[in-house]
Amino acid sequence: MSQPDSPAAATQAPAPTPAAATISTPAPAPTPAGPLSRAAHAAASAVIPGGVNSPVRAWKRLGGNPLTIARGKGSRIWDLDGKSYIDYVLSWGPLIVGHAHPAVVGAVRRTARDGLGFGAPTLAETEICEVIRSALPAMEQVRLVSSGTEAVMSALRLARAATGRDLVIKCDGCYHGHSDPLLVAAGSGCATLNTPDSSGVPAAIAAHTLSVPYNDAAAVERALTAHRGRVAAVIVEPVAGNMGLVLPKPGWLDALRRLCTEHGTLLIFDEVMTGFRVAWGGWQTVCGVTPDLTCLGKVIGGGLPVAAYGGRRDLMSHLAPIGACYQAGTLSGNPVAVAAGLATLKLCASKGFYAKQQAALAKLAAGLRQLAARRGVPIQISQAGTMWGFYFSERPVVDWTTAAASNQERWRTFFLGMINRGVYLAPSPFEAAFWSSAHRRGDVSATLAAAAEALEECSS
Ligand SMILES: *Cc1c(COP(=O)(O)O)cnc(C)c1O
């Protein structure tokens, strides 16, 4: 069972695939999938479309074979072939205390012993909603659901119910889950597959969604004015994490707040990714802008399926069973999932947790910046709390257009250079990266050592 503590170098021979062969760049290092991962992916592909249960898991951009993961502990994951990686994906964000934290696993074990779920109220549901409300006072009332998609879909239905309006404004490159009305200009997963919109979404439904550039208050104002009295909600990722990481420009979220208030439109912050990740609470506690409704997910489930939406009490009272807006879930507030979430939030609530992790991650970001500068590789690295992201770009990235203009071939070379040196980043140039309290100084130095070599490959 002993596993190497330092990033392992790839030893497996390349598995050339047709997709890889069509990309014409200086032959990049092969993906590191070993024979067991490759066999597992072949078996999966026979029974699961593309061999994955969520498209972002496929290494479609890389023309490679995704790794099949056997286990995780702390900052590391191990693939089926026994290779270990420093993990900056962290289950796409939820694992802010790292893999298999004993306090989280212990809470799950203890809770599971008393039954996996009842479809009736349990005490822990109230407890986690109280924790959420204390951290995010704008969430006067909270409803638990099982995925971020459900949280956003339900918040949108509620916004329409409360305003009696149909239209919604979102931003290009922001992802709000895969519900029909929000699969318009939806960022990473769709962008990675080069399908800006999904087939199967009726045009009549997509027509109720207006999409404007991120960080562009004038565009929102124009849309609200053009459709005066018809826009139920403006929904936004207060820090955009699904087109890489794009920070909000100073004043942009304040402008959204002012415009929404002027137009009787609700402001929805989708903090599914940023909630309890950029700070205790979410970006709203950092920027001081109060949304009408907030969506949470990812970290509040600690790796199990918990998500939530909430906001002003008068809005939330439109929900069944008190109001006429229906929303339900067999597994909503599942006790085992809530136990994982509560245990995770308790660890995050410890004094100085976010400041400490943010400072540790800032060292990694600074190190990467320095390495890239020394090799003359233009890079944009940004950080929000324990989230980070990078683009190979000379200009600052402020929206989807500038994100999409970044150098994707260079990203590919870098990604392969890193994974082959034991550092696991998201397999797309349009995803954020994450940091956990299980990451240590040794992980930073190992990551920087890998990056020094990978950047060398990028500059050649
Ligand atoms: C991940 C994410 C979602 C969707 O959550 P799921 O749990 O995958 O359905 C929605 N909004 C944002 C901002 C996200 O990052």
Image (cartoon, rainbow, N blue to C red):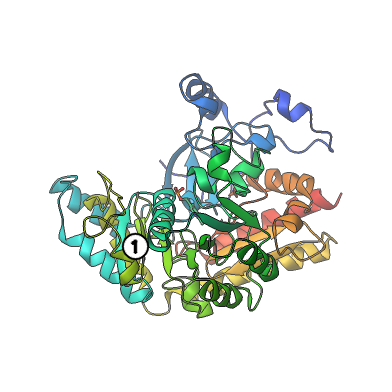
Does any atom of ligand 1 lie closer than 8 Å to the CB of label 1?
A: no
Residue sitting at the far left: 114
147 sits left or right of 192 in the view: left
Q: Residue 273: horizontal and vertical position, in percent?
A: 49, 59
Residue sitting at the far front: 229
Q: Residue 102: horizontal and vertical position, in percent?
A: 31, 57
Residue designated by label 1? 344
Mark 1 falls on what kind of element? helix
Question: Between residues 287 and 182, which one lies in front from this camera angle?
Answer: 182
Judge whether 242 appears above or below 78 on screen: below
Q: Residue 226: horizontal and vertical position, in percent?
A: 65, 62
The amino acid type found where label 1 is placed reads Thr
Question: Between residues 420 and 104, which one lies in front from this camera angle?
Answer: 104
452 sits left or right of 419 in the view: right
Question: Which picture quadrant has residue 59?
Answer: top right
Density class for disc 1 (Cα within 10 Å; few <14, some 14-19, many ≥20) is many
Q: Residue at x 21, y 56 (%)?
A: 321
